Every structure is written in C-alpha cells, then in structure tokens.
Image (tube, rainbow, N blue to C red):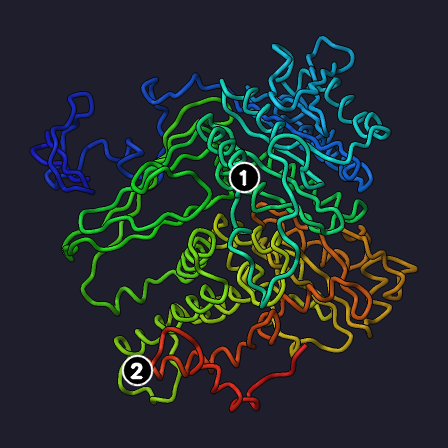
Amino acid sequence: MVFRNGGGKFVCNLCTYPNDTPSEYFCATTPQGVRVDRDQRPELCRGTVEFTVPKEYWTKEPVGLNWLFLIDVTQEAFNKGFLEAFCDGILSALYSAEDEVDENGEPKRRLPQGAKVGFLTYDKEIHFYSCHASLEQPQMMVMPDVEDPFVPLSDGLFVDPVESRAVITSLLTRLPTLFSSVKNPEPALLPTLNSAIAALDKTGGKVVCSLSALPTWGPGRLFMRDDGKHPGGELDKKLYTAEHPGWKKTAEKMVASGIGVDFFLAAPSGGYLDIATIGHVASLTGGETFYYPNFVAGRDNAKLSLEITHTVTRETGYQALMKVRCSNGLQIKDYHGSFLQHTFGADLEIGVIDADKAIGVTFGYDGKLDAKLDAHFQSALLYTTASGQRRVRCCNIIASVSEVTRECVKMIDQDAVVSILAKEAATKLATTSATLKETRQHLTERTIDVLANYRKNLTTSSHPPGQLIMPERLKEFSMYMLGLLKCRAFKGGNESSDRRIHEMRMVRSMGAGELSVYLYPRMIPIHNLTAEDGFPDENGHLKVPPSLRASFSRIEPGGVYLVDNGQQCLIWFHSQTSPNLLSDLFGEGKDSLKALDPYSSSLPHLDTHLNAQVRNIIEFLKTLRGSKALTIQLARQGIDGAEFEFARMLVEDRNNEAQSYVDWLVSLHKGVQLELAGHRKKDGDENLSSTLGNFSGLRPAYW
C-alpha cells in the first residue's frame, strides 16, 4: 500500500484507486513516503495478520466451539471393537495424561477455555446424554422417532469437559457394555445428523461421527449402489456423487449454520459404505473423512485414538467465509478444496476449517500486467475461533512481474504446480462427465505441454534434439505426475469406489507438502544405519539417513525398509532378514519373521542401539505428518498382505496399471518430440503407446 500527500491519501494495491486516509488511521510519512508508524502496525509490515471484528461481521453471537460426538452403537461397531476403540479415543483426546500439567500445576486442558462437548449415540434410535457436572451418573434420553428428530434436552447436552470429567469418563467407559446386548444391525445416520443440526443451530460447532455399517435405516437410508463390476476399472459417474437429495440438503443446512463434520468410518470387512454420499457432507462442510477399509481392533486402535486426538486438538475455526482478491489484469479462474460456493464469484462458505486444510486457487489473465508494478494477491478468512472470538485473517502475497520468461521459470514452486494440477484433475473427475481414462490422458497432456513448451521457448540450441530437457526447478515434476497417475484416485484397473472417491477428495483438500509425500513415499533402509543415524548431531538436529528411490531394484537381500507416504507407514522385511536384527528391534525371542506379532502398531521400548535409532526416526516422521496419525504396520515378505501395499508404493516400478518411471520418461520424450515437430495428437495416446515396445531394454528389474 502506498501513501501520498504526506499520509493523507493511500493507493489500494489491488485496484490502484486513491482513497482518503481515515482521520483515525492518519500518520505522517517520511520524505521517502513511508509511514512513521509502519513497524508498529502489523498490517503494514507482516504478510499474515488477524483482526478481531466488530458486531457488524457477526452472523450469530460468538461462543466457544461446541463439539458433538455421534457414536455408532450398532452390532457391527460392537463386534469389531470399533465402539470401544472410539470411546477410548475420545477419552484420550479430551483428557491429557497425568504428567501433562499447565503452568499452574493443573491438568492441561486439551480444549480451549469456553469450548464444550456433548454426546449422542445412535442405531435405529437416537440417544441423548446429559453429562451435567451435578449428576453422579449420565442421564440417557431415547428418541425413537427418527422421521422427525428433535433435541429432547434443554440443558446439560453441552458441558465443560473439565467440570464434568467424572460423568463423561463414566459414560464413555460404560457405553460398550451398555449396548453389548442390544445389537441393532442398521444405523440411522441422516436423522442423527439432522438432530445434530438442531442441537448446534443456534451456535454452530463441530461434529465428530463414527460409523461402521451402511446406514440403511430411517429417512435418507442408503443402498448398495456399487456392485463391484467396473469394466476396465471405470466407475459409473453416478458413484462419484451424492444422489440422495436429503443428504445434499443436510450438508447445505450445516454450512449455513456454521457446522462441520469429521467422519471416522470403519468398513465392515472392507465392505461398501457409500463414501460418495456420506463423505459429501464432510467435504461440503469443510470437514474430513478418516477411512479404515479393514479395521482390526488390536492393530488400528492406536491410529484411531491418535487421529481423534489430533482432530480435537488442532487449530480449528468455524462459521467461516473466505474471499480471494488479486490485482488488476488478473482474475480468479477456479477454486479447489472443501467448501460450498453457491455461484462462481461468491464467497466460499465453510462450516469448519482447520490447520490441515488447503484451498487451491488458479488465476488467469484478463488484461496486461505492468512490469513496473508488482502483482498482489490477498485472501480474507472471516471465522470464529475455538475460544469464541470472531476474527478475520488476511494473507497477502506480493509477486514481481517480469517480461523475461526465463526469470519466472527460476522461481517455480514444484510442489505448488503438482498440487494445483492434482486438485484440478480431482475436481474435473468429480464434477464433470470426464472418465478416469480421460482424466489420466489430461494429466499426461499437461505434463507433455510443460516439458514441450520449456524445450520450445526457453532452451538454447546447444542441447541435442534427442535429449529430454527438464526445467531446473521441475526436475522431479515428471516423477510426481507418474505418482499421481498411480494413486488410487486416478489409477487404472479395479479399485473399490469407496477407496477411490475417498482418496480423490483427500487430494482436493490436502496441502502441497503432504501431497508430495503421498505421491512419492519416503523409503529409509534401517538394516545398515550408521552409529550416528537416528540421533542428534552437534547442532541438535536429528540425523536422518537419506531416502532411497522407490523401486524394488534398490532393495537388498536381507534388508529392512521403513516406507512412509504420509497416510500409512510400513516396515518391510526381506525373507532373509537377520535374526539378530529382529531381536534388536523387537526384543528377545523375536528372532524370526513368523515370531513377530502381525498386529503390532509400534516398536517396543528397548535398550538396544538399533531400537532407539528407529524409534527416533519414527518420532521425527510424526512431526512431518498432516492429519493422519503415524503407526507402523509390518509387511513381511511372503507372509503379510501388507506386502502388496508396499509393492504399490514403489512408484518407479511398473505397477498400479501404469508404466515404470523409465517407460514414462520415454513416452513423455516421444510426446515432446511430436509436439516440437507439429505432429502431436492430443485426443489419444496411440502414438505414444506404440513406441514403448521398442524400449524394453531400458526397463529396470521389477517387483
């Protein structure tokens, strides 16, 4: 922002229109035109600033965030152990360990002051619980009428978790036993969500809901839409969206009331849950879906508990509106993420927003930018904090404008490029008539366009014509794009609709850093660590061994590898792994692969050097995670089914119905050459695929 006339006028950096400076904001300027108080005003010297807003920006009275836990108590939830695990997870999320205390010596609060919690359980009926601190035991009220749900409690549904700790602990401890003999098999989820709207309508809030069976009871009942028959791996386009009007209406009501939902879904033996419909509510309200396709209580309890804790404790706001602005000469083309937008150009409406969400915005030219002026971008997020303050967060970015293209290429952010292409592809697949094959072809064409335009316009004639040139700032771009084609959201071949749609929505809402690891996993060898690996160096930084390329050709006989893609973490053991190494990692008596517990989710605490090294590396990887908790899963060669997941993560090999990295580069190179020669056809890849058979000698050893 530029101030003129001694501070009497300011020029808007977006529209360049001069305005009079309000008298209460006036300050004299230096001879250079800089305000004297610039360093004292955060909005003039910081890129991101938050302001507390007056009542004109309130939609309703701001209060602390109300959390409403909806707990599935059907037969499947009890039999799988999911009910007990979810209740234990809520307890560990709400209450810190005994050794965690604040500065006053009191037990540390997990939720901010003013936040409250409430509890509902549901099967064919909906059960409300009063956990008022004055009660000795929680009181349950049953609402059997799911056709017209309402809230039977006027007081006591939402309570302070610290004041009512004894009552809440008693409730969550007794719930699995309470419903052990009832065992209704069918949940009525949509009426329960409508009850949650009735409970939170006046204040807004956050809903955390568990589900372990297809909701086939009451209004909004769902049916088995996916029969598992997908010719060529192509899903019916109807399976990508929520067809039931009741679910769409409920999602829009939640956004209007400032409510968001996080779902924790445990599929019954990997069965169908219709995530396209259920997850639509989470996606539209700004929430998140945590999916456990084959939940096993002994193995997945720790992961579930950590993810509930992260959901409750991460920075969260609600009743949010977002607007993005840019300089003259630019215009907004598209938004990508989890939000509701009634018409293009309107503000983005978000029920809840948290620290793990990302929204992608693409801009286009609607005029010509002046190279003498900077380009400015601003996002303004109006929201209510978890402690009950109404704020607006302004994020500002300034970018230099240059007429020399080579200067711009030097500043490319590779992660941002891959992220926006991935979000565009996910949006295209979900909201248009494009098929999976057409979406993959679109991604391939975009990759060739980037490389061909760089070769055509930005390289010198010194490079031989038969050489594939990668931009300096996009060296790994082709690898990430291959990983995108191989991820479950876009891969060819058969894949359950639930997993495909879940990961497609996940790609739309995750940040650039998390997406990069998801597309190209880390693979760390732990059988040949040096003595210093896994411990701090002289500067206090943990020394982490370098990652290997994700290919089976890098695997050594007898090796043990830690593979992490930000969503799950595997430890893969070669069939010839040394018994001494196994004993050092897991303790005495664990000297063979078959002696290991396949349901282990963490390493035991031992005094051995190797055990301490690997535990330290795992703790370091936890700090790099997004919303998904890091627990380990064993993949023993020739024994565990998780070995197939390990093979799927080796994205440089030929798998996931796609080429190896070498073959992919060959096909890209051919596409670039055809583009430069003017012979490229963009409506299919017949010309590319026909050339691959000539390069079999370039293929590495495969899995």
Quarter in which the N terminus is drawn: top left
Between 257 and 632, which is closer to the camera in this rendering?
257
**Amino acid under label 1?**
His
Which residue was labeled with disc 2? 676
Give the residue at x 65% y 24%: 146
Quadrant assignment, res 288 = top right
Q: Residue furthest top?
A: 134
Is disc 2 surrounded by few (<14), some (14 to 19) or many (20+) residues within 10 Å?
some
Q: Earlier in the sequence, mark 2 or mark 1?
A: 1
**595 sits left or right of 514 in the view:** right
**466 sits left or right of 96 in the view:** left
Q: Position of residue 209 (x, y in %)?
A: 64, 34
**390 sits left or right of 660 in the view:** left
Looking at the picture, does residue 598 appear above or below residue 304?
Answer: below
Mark 2 secondary-structure assignment: helix
Q: Which mark is residue 321?
A: none
State whether residue 701 appears in this view. yes
Mark 1 secondary-structure assignment: loop
Q: Position of residue 91 (x, y in %)?
A: 72, 30
**Amino acid under label 2?**
Leu
Q: Position of residue 669 (x, y in %)?
A: 41, 82
Looking at the picture, does residue 343 appear above or below residue 511?
Answer: above
Looking at the picture, does residue 696 appear above or below residue 226?
Answer: below
Q: Which mark is residue 244?
A: 1
The CA span between labels 2 and 1 is: 49 Å
Which of label 2 and label 1 is nearer to you? 1
